[in-house]
Structure formats: structure tokens, C-alpha cells
Amino acid sequence: MKKVILIFSLLLTTIAFAQNKNAKASIEVDGVCVMCKERIEKAAIRTKGVKSAVWTIKTHELKLIYDARKTDLETISKQVASVGHDTKEIKATKEQYNSVHPCCRYRDEAVIDDHKNE
């Protein structure tokens, strides 16, 4: 019986430490300008467990360092979508999208064209 308890304890300990406290990942996030960059990074970094969030305007890539014991990519994507920016996994609602500044309306072709020269 002691051996079973010991094996069970070791298994639980291994599972608990299996998640990475400095996981690295990147997700695609739609946006067009510096205001979008600030909004996206702020939303991501405010997610509990996110340590670093850097979004690149040209590539639409949000590079993350986060504690996988406290959060996951779906939660981060939901947080980013909640401020009006689509990710591949989660799309912002119409209301969330409409809350962004008019120059940040990345679904509008005219806005995208306006930002091409930046």
C-alpha cells in the first residue's frame, strides 16, 4: 500500500511540474497600426500568467511568454478578442470590433489601404 501511495504521489508531482512556467508561443492577431499594437499587447499582458507580449504590425504575429500553469492560448486569444481584435482561434464580436478606433478597423479594405504606406 505504501508503494502505491508513493507511486501515486510521484505521478502527481510529475504532472504538476510538466506545465511550463515560461512557455513561448505566437498567435496571429489582426490589426493595422500602432494603436492596435498597444491595445493588443495591453490586453495580452493583462491576462494572468502572461509575462511578455509583443505584436508586430507587418506580420500580425503576437509573440508570447506565459506561465502555462496559469493560462493558455485560448484564454489569451479571448482576452485579445475582447478588445476588438480577431485571432485565428477567436473572432471579436461585432460590438467588440466596433469599439476600436475608426482607423483601426482592420476588416475594412479602405482602412487597410490607408495603412499600407506606413
Image: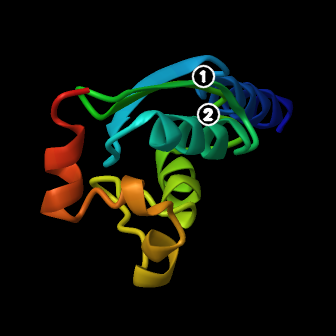
Compared with 93, 70 (above or below) is above
Label 1 belongs to which residue?
20
Image quadrant holding the N terminus, namely: top right
Q: Identify the residue at horizontal 50%, vertical 63% (top origin).
A: 100
Quarter of the view holding residue 58: top left
Quarter of the view holding residue 90: bottom left
User: x%, y% of residue 17?
Assistant: 69, 23
Dot 2 or dot 1, earlier in sequence = 1
Which secondary structure lies at badge 1? Answer: loop
User: x%, y% of residue 102?
Assistant: 42, 63
The 10 Å Cα crowd at callout 1, few under 14, some 14 to 19, many 20 or more, is: few
Label 2 belongs to which residue?
68
State if disc 1 and disc 2 touch (CB < 8 Å): yes
User: x%, y% of residue 114?
Assistant: 21, 45
The 10 Å Cα crowd at callout 2, few under 14, some 14 to 19, many 20 or more, is: some
The residue closer to the viewer here, 32 or 29, is: 32
